[in-house]
Amino acid sequence: MKKTTFIGPFSQILPMTHLKINGSIHDNDLPLIEDGGIVIRNGRIEKIGPYRNLKSELAGEEVTERVLEGSHVCLPGFIDAHTHICYGGSRARDYAMRNSGKSYLEIAREGGGIWDTVTQTRKTSEDELARGIVKRAKRHLKNGVTTIEVKSGYGLSVEEELKMLRAIGEASTLSAQDLIPTCLAAHICPKDFEGSSQEYLDTIMQELFPQIKEQDLCRRVDIFVEESAFTTEEAESYLRFAREMGFDLTIHADQFTTGGSQLAVKMGAISADHLEASTEKEIKLLAGSTVIATALPGASLGLGCAFTPARKILDAGGALAIASDHNPGSGPMGDLLTQAAILGAFEKLSNAEVLAGITFRAAAALNLEDRGALAIGSRADLAVFHTGHYNEILYNQGNLKPCMVWKNGQLVFDKHKI
């Protein structure tokens, strides 16, 4: 039996449909439905349009109606396309050291950094990791995020990476959102590995990848291309092997030095994430490719460094997604909406560009075609705000939170029932 839900009236619906994936977007380009309604059947959007017209069409049908009182704006559920919310422990000490003047590399040499989290994550059970993910995912839900990419990368051994990916899978069954797992076993070369960086990557390729495939733990592979992690030469052979095994590719690219984004273009990666160090050369390469450039303002705020050159990427014709990089070290805030609003202010992005970056362009960064826009047949993932105009959402820079969030047509968060 088909279950039908009718929601409205909304003061405004921003479906984010019929917008280009690449380049700049003006606010005047945004499709806008005023006094609108949404019909959901079996978790998918069946109809969207003027509320009164839809109400007349549904007359006589068995429908569950959610009548909204007051002003409300509806957007597609937000998508956080880059997070590290599977981890153990804390890196508050790193943050204090950074603010005292220590560099990222200095902190790592003094026992902090990624290896500190690896040590703590290895001590954390699979069940504890899963519960930690669920807890952090609930925070994201209250900010309107209905799909979250979650990376491994704090295990850095075959068994520990499998533990992390299993924990992500378990958390996905316990969370209201969809959690999209990514294997980041190539985060750094572990300090306790007896061999070279290339030998470590060989171990991951030969021993971990087949088990991931056999257990269907994830379909995406990431690598950190940086002086403190892996070279472009090491990364290229690794990514080629992963691609031949059928994985989608993404790269931690151009965070402190360049090279990663060029490799992303060469390898046909779905996305290149970070890009704070990208120059005109890298921006031009990205703009001429199908790679989604993913800005991570949370890392810039956490590290106190420059933002991704988002304006230049868009003006060059690139596709820009925005993600939180929620992680225990450089991006502990994890508030996607706040970070996106701040990036927009500093990089002079239109509201349309910011919202595109956390909806349909973020979906493209995860190679997902069934969400990110309120189109007929798409997943009924909705972020609803108690306001009369969508401009208020970014204007409040994260202080205006959703009052309701719907996932696959189900009301999964209602501020009024907290």
Image (tube, helix red, strand yellow):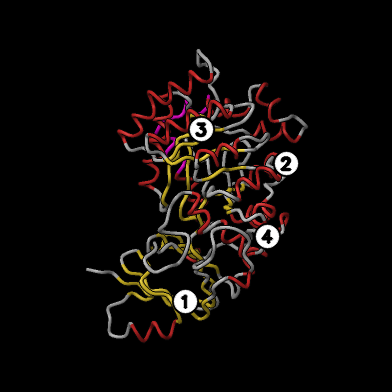
Q: Is residue 68 above or below residue 281?
A: below
Regarding mark 3 in the picture, which secondary structure is present there? loop
Q: Which residues are magenta?
A: 119-133
Circle 3 packing at 10 Å, graded few (<14), some (14-19), many (20+), is many
Q: Which residue is mark 4?
A: 349
Q: Residue furthest right?
A: 101
Q: Is residue 256 above or below residue 202?
A: below
- The kind of secondary structure the magenta stretch mainly shows is helix
Three-letter code, disc 3: Gly
Three-letter code, disc 1: Leu
Regarding mark 4 in the picture, which secondary structure is present there? loop
Q: Which residue is mark 2?
A: 305
Point out the tag, 4 or 1, that comes first from the N-terminus.
1
Asked if the residue at tag 1 contacts the one at tag 2, i.e. Cβ–Cβ closer than 8 Å, the answer is: no
Q: Which residue is mark 3?
A: 88
The CA distance from mark 4 to mark 1 is: 31 Å
- Which x, y percent locates residue 168? 41, 40
Q: Nearer the viewer, residue 399 or 357?
A: 357
